[in-house]
Image (cartoon, rainbow, N blue to C red):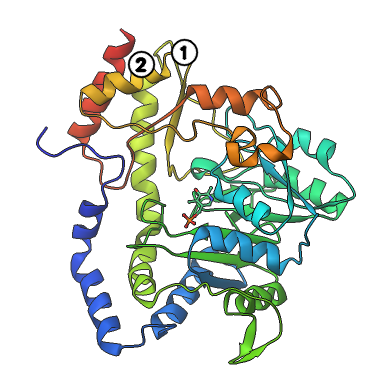
Amino acid sequence: MKDAIQMVDLKSQYLKIKPEIDNALLSAVEEVAYINGPQVKRFTNSLKEFNKVNAAVTCANGTDALQIAMMGLGFKPGDEVIVPAFTYIATVEVIALLGLVPKFIDVIEDTFELDHTKLEGVISDKTVGVIPVHLFGQCSNMEAILSIAKKHNISVIEDTAQAMGAQYLYKDGSTAFAGTMGDIGTTSFFPSKNLGCFGDGGALLTNNVELGERVHIIANHGQRKKYYHETIGVNSRLDTLQAAILDVKIKYLNEYSSARQKVAKKYDESLNRLSGLIIPNRANYSTHVFNQYTCRIGNGKRDELKSYLQEKGIPTMVYYPIPVHLQEAYCTYGYNSGDFPVAERLCQEVISFPIHTEMKDNVQDYIIENIISFFN
Ligand SMILES: *Cc1c(COP(=O)(O)O)cnc(C)c1O
């Protein structure tokens, strides 16, 4: 094995479309419209069209997108927002920063999404919203979540940072893109996300044009007209150079999803008979775009497998080692170990194997051989 194996191979992905990216970057540099250049508008439009949604608003990163969404929905300090206990910290961080109160709920062990059967139990008269996180690349059960949200008149923010391009499959056979079903969806263009730029970037998607306008204003210092501030906002812009890159890469997003699905299928077929390794059952209400390929390892053997593979030059990641309710920074909310048994167990069991758009057959064969040899 000549080159080191990586979780994500961004270099090869770039080299494949280098002339197109380089041209887009060079012309953005030469046009000198470094802030809110025409590339930003162009990409915003591409994003809107790709997702078949009424409004798209770009911003500086996926964490800002979540914050701007909550500001746009008018959440006030003291309001409660429901989030899964098993997610990336950003989802919860902005809730706390805005003085809102996070209410955690447990997740479903196969799909890693919030357990909608627990949702009604935590809704109070202070609840204003719920954030389903489409973790690892697959949509949460939106029909179930939306119907409960509607019944209790609370907003739904879809954290789509890991699922750009995934499609929800409604019972009636129709489909919708991840991030376009709730009141608003947020996403990230961090380099390792499914649609990644060469730095930071983020966006919001909504079919509510008025809400789209509101978050657009909030992301731009609360102004519609320069120096006239109608609301408290933030400074959160997608960089022009990043927009130029993204407007090239979005054309390849479906191809990228297929490439990831092909890698996942090969892992599935090769690893499904190993006792000790659990491939989660996938949702039948969503396609899966595999931002991560995540399995569960029982019997306390996860860390042993991780070191074993590390010795063979195979990187793996644990997303996530500690559930949010047990993070030191969030201990003031009064949760204890044992509160969310599924999330807590997943943190002991999950392991993510390398997956990306440029995976070579011989590299994946090597990874698979070594996973199998650990269990034999
Ligand atoms: C990456 C990620 C975010 C935050 O995105 P940034 O662009 O890094 O701020 C939020 N939620 C989830 C689930 C993520 O994976």
- From what the image shows, is residue 283 above or below residue 197? above
- From what the image shows, is residue 131 above or below residue 226? above
The total of numbered circles placed on residues is 2
Circle on res. 362: none
Residue drawn at (43%, 60%), measured in percent from left and top? 189
User: Mark 2 and 1 residues: CB-CB less than 8 Å, in contact?
Assistant: yes
**CA–CA distance in space, label 2 to label 1:** 8 Å
Residue drawn at (49%, 41%), measured in percent from left and top? 136
Q: Residue flagged by tag 1: what amino acid is it? A: Gly
Residue drawn at (23%, 27%), measured in percent from left and top? 365
Quadrant (top left, top right, bottom left, bottom right) of the N terminus: top left
Residue drawn at (59%, 65%), measured in percent from left and top? 205
Extreme residue toward the left, this view? 2
Q: Tell me the element at label 2.
A: helix
- Seen from the viewer's position, the closer of residues 98 and 358 is 98
Residue on which the image places disc 2: 304
Quadrant (top left, top right, bottom left, bottom right) of the C terminus: top left
Residue 181: horizontal and vertical position, in percent? Answer: 66, 57
Apparent side of residue 236 relative to residue 107 in the rendered image (left or right): left
Residue on which the image places disc 1: 300
Extreme residue toward the top, this view? 376
Q: Residue flagged by tag 2: what amino acid is it? A: Glu
- From what the image shows, is residue 299 above or below residue 319? above
- From what the image shows, is residue 158 above or below residue 105? below
Tell me if the residue at label 1 has its CB under 8 Å from ligand 1. no
**10 Å neighbourhood of mark 1: few (<14), some, or many (≥20)?**
few
Residue 169: horizontal and vertical position, in percent? Answer: 61, 47
Residue 167: horizontal and vertical position, in percent? Answer: 55, 51
**10 Å neighbourhood of mark 2: few (<14), some, or many (≥20)?**
few
Apparent side of residue 68 relative to residue 22 in the rendered image (left or right): right
Q: Tell me the element at label 1.
A: loop
